[in-house]
Amino acid sequence: MRLGVNIDHVATLRQARQAAYPSPLEAAALCEKAGADGITLHLRHDRRHIQDADLMALRSAVNIPINLEMANTAEMVAIALEARPDEVCLVPETAAEVTTEGGLDAVRQFDALKPTIARLKEAGMVISLFIEPAVEQLDAAVALGAPVVELHTGTYSTSTGAKQLEELARLVAAARHGHGIGLQINAGHGLNTENLPPFLAAVPHLDTLNIGHSIVARAVMVGMVEAVREIKALMPS
Ligand code: PXP
């Protein structure tokens, strides 16, 4: 199983002071050294953490695949076509949110997503859709020609007790259905060393996990290399 480390919050720390450090690029290189399989970053419309220059320079900092999370806007499509990440994960984005809230509605936004996916695929990028674990969203991803979905684990990660078990069951069913219709199954949002083991024990067919906040938070205490290694040690190889 692969780990994509999301480096957004290294940039959050930098932007808090509008300083030159800490460098998300240096962090990305340490993630690679620690065994990360990819680097994920979200260029948001408001540029609250990752900046355009980070994305453009990342290719020279690491040799592992780059996954750009972005909203489906003309501005972001143009940037992706220039930056040429290996993978683009289309996410919903609203200005007021603290972090991505919920998955993309691939059913209702079908017509808007279709040309973007076609364009980015034609340019050689692998397209992933960040969606809720729901059958209709998975079916829409296939109909849109997206080969990969990232199941939103935010609700699982922030809930407890019966609600968490219910959400885990939804994730299991979605992973099975998605795998059955030929999708690559990724997952992410809110995963950490505590909620990851039960998640991994239950959810089948996982290819890649994208994890950011908990790794960067842990890196403040033990360093980036150790923080990445701790998560990797919980994942099957
Ligand atoms: N995957 C997607 C699509 C996301 O939007 C995010 C947050 O930027 C993550 C994964 C990582 O989530 P977290 O930082 O909570 O680990």
Image: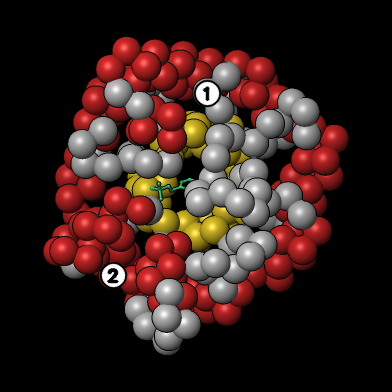
Tag nearer the camera, 1 or 2: 1
Type of amino acid at the residue the image marks with label 2? Leu
| Numbered tag placed on residue 133 in the rendering | 1
Residue at screen point 26% across, 34% down: 196
| Numbered tag placed on residue 192 in the rendering | none
Label 2 sits on residue:
30
Give the color scheme: rainbow, by chain, secondary structure or one colour. Answer: secondary structure
**Helix, strand or loop at disc 2?**
helix
As displayed, is residue 179 above or below residue 65?
above
Q: Residues within 10 Å of mark 2 (few under 14, many from 20)?
A: some
Residue at screen point 43% across, 68% down: 12
Residue at screen point 43% across, 85% down: 19
Type of amino acid at the residue the image marks with label 1? Pro
As displayed, is residue 132 above or below residue 19?
above
As displayed, is residue 112 above or below residue 197?
below
| Number of numbered tags placed on the structure image | 2
Say left or right for 103 vs 23: right
Report whether the residue tagged 2 is closer than 8 Å to ligand 1. no
- Closer to the camera in the image, 160 or 112: 160
Which residue occupies the extreme bottom position in the image? Answer: 20
Residue 90: x and y in percent read 64, 46
Report whether the residue tagged 1 is closer than 8 Å to ligand 1. no
Q: Quadrant of residue 158?
A: top left
Q: Is residue 236 visible?
A: no
Residue 59: x and y in percent read 51, 73
Say left or right for 228 vs 20: left
Quadrant housing the N terminus: top left
Residue at screen point 52% across, 75% down: 54
- Closer to the camera in the image, 68 or 125: 68
Q: Residues within 10 Å of mark 1 (few under 14, many from 20)?
A: many
Residue 180: x and y in percent read 54, 16
